[in-house]
Image: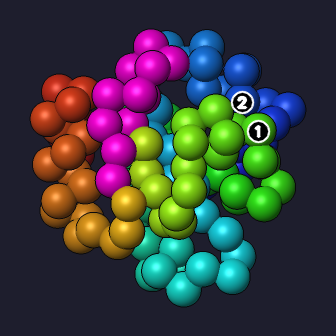
Amino acid sequence: MVIVNNDNYDELVAKSDVPVVLDFGATWCGPCKKLEPVIEELAGEMEGKVFVGKVDVEKARDVAAKFGVMSVPTVIFLKGGEPVHQFVGVESKEKITGMISQHFGVGV
């Protein structure tokens, strides 16, 4: 999974030609560790259709602030650089896949 930070945000996210899913987390966050394998699996399955990136809120404070991320894990769906959906907490792969399909019209 690609790490998104303050320096590469514009290149990887704002200018992305495909929809984007950003997973905001922190190394000390237990629920983030539980969600991470699910997001990584989706990143592999969605490669080329959806860009999936990971944001460490402590290392990329500007990116986290841009979206008002106050709790982790937070997952934000973006289309054309604009947020279209987000959720906080841990969800199943099936539920996240359904959200991706609903908001981006893309299936696994």
Where 12 falls versus 6 (above or below)?
above
Left or right of 57 in this view: 81: left
Q: Is residue 55 visible?
A: yes
Q: Main secondary structure of the magenta part?
A: strand
Q: Residue furthest bottom?
A: 30
Left or right of 30 in this view: 35: left
Amino acid residing under circle 1: Asp
Where 36 falls versus 43 (above or below)?
below
Image point 17% across, 27% down: which residue? Answer: 105
Span colored in magenta? 77-87
Sequence-wise, the earlier of marks 1 and 2 is: 2
Q: Is residue 47 visible?
A: no
Q: Using a 10 Å C-alpha cutoff, classify the residue at mark 2 as few (fewer than 14 neighbours), some (14 to 19) or many (20 or more).
A: some
Image point 38% across, 37% down: which residue? Answer: 77
What is the secondary structure assignment of the residue under circle 1?
helix
What is the secondary structure assignment of the residue under circle 2?
helix
Amino acid residing under circle 2: Tyr
Q: Quadrant of residue 25?
A: bottom right
Image point 24% across, 70% down: which residue? Answer: 92
Residue 54: within the magenta?
A: no
Residue pointed to by mark 1: 62
Where 88 falls versus 22 (above or below)?
below
Callout 1–callout 2 Cβ contact below 8 Å: yes
